[in-house]
Image (cartoon, rainbow, N blue to C red):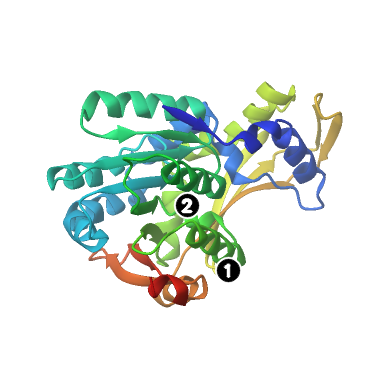
Amino acid sequence: MLLYDTDKYIRNNDFANQIQKGLEAKKKYVHPKYFYDQIGSDLFEKISEQPEYYLTRTESSLLEKYSKDIYRICGNRDISIVELGSGSSSKTRILLDTFLSLGGSIYYFPIDVSESMLSNSINNLFSSYRNLGIIGVCSEFSSGAKRVKEFITNHNGIPVKKLLLFLGSSIGNFEPFEVRIFLTELASQMNHGDTMLIGFDLQKEKTYLEKAYNDAAGITAKFNLNILARINRELSGDFELSQFKHEAFYNMNKKRIEMHLTSLCDQSVLIRDTGQQIVFRKGERIHTENSYKFSLDQINALVTQSGLTVLKNYVDDDNLYCLSHLGYVSSASESGK
């Protein structure tokens, strides 16, 4: 079963409008959410398999090690697992296996902007889990969480208690002030007893980070360049991908990896559907992504400022990554119920 965020489909010109806005800015940019068409989603799955990309295997090992403790903290055999940006749901299977083995009624609500990725993932899950309720939501993060909350409220038999998942360190794509806004929005979709599990990539040595975003196989470069290919496909652009170069580096001052596409020559690009003629100077960049890295103190502060509380921080032995299990801080009126 697939649900849709109708507002998203009403705004069917969103991609064109945002591309036009970003490429006309003084410092050109594209929002990283537009990486994830079907081709981009498939490329990201390949990135996660590269030896340099420690994030996926480290997060998976933490889920393997602590899934029973996560289940215990959730405190209920019947639960709805709601995942933001679910992708292929490969890591989520670790939690699903544990939760289902411990009994209870489990429903899984994967939320993703890619309808094809979502459909493929759901079909694969249905073939693996006969006793799992699965309801997909094609939507962006916050509106998808709201859609799930409304759906659960209006349908009997679906567990009311929720575990929200936001894995893969996608939280690092937000600016710091946006993290607080985002977490506050998610908290507003939680009820007393709900919890949230978020992956945070931790601050570490520069060379280690830069290798992860410049894999030897060049998959991250293809992923980055695919945004230009998507503009060509969907907006009738004439970007020559060979005239742009993937660049990813660690900004020490801002504690973030930055990804850019750099023009290799002076050139002009036509995007027919938006009527734009974009001029690039040699060496000019399109800023495509930030990936902030966190300290434990930062995580704790951001969580507290967002009206949530840290129930448990799970960190690997090498201090590469943190899975934060967060609780909802109920209001006085709720706690008195």
Q: Nearer the viewer, residue 179 or 60?
A: 179
The percent coordinates of residue 64 (x first, y second) are 19, 51
- Circle on res. 130: none
Assess disc 2: are there few (<14), some (14-19) or many (≥20) residues with their C-alpha within 10 Å of its C-alpha: some
Mark yes or no: residue 288 visible.
Answer: yes
Residue at the farthest front position: 337
The percent coordinates of residue 310 (x first, y second) are 36, 71
Q: Residue at x 40, y 50 (%)?
A: 168
Name the amino acid, label 1: Lys
- Circle on res. 254: 1
Report the quarter where the N terminus lies.
top left
Labels 1 and 2: the sequence-earlier one: 2
Q: Nearer the viewer, residue 35 or 337?
A: 337
Work out whether 18 lies above or below 334: above
The percent coordinates of residue 277 (x first, y second) are 86, 32
Residue 86: image quadrant is: top left
Q: Residue at x 38, y 70 (%)?
A: 337
- Circle on res. 170: 2
Name the amino acid, label 2: Ser
Work out whether 283 lies above or below 228: below
Q: Residue at x 55, y 42 (%)?
A: 140
Mark yes or no: residue 298 visible.
Answer: no
Residue 94: image quadrant is: top left
Give left or right: position of 33 versus 239. Answer: left
Give left or right: position of 315 versus 2. Answer: left
**Which structural element holds mark 1?**
loop
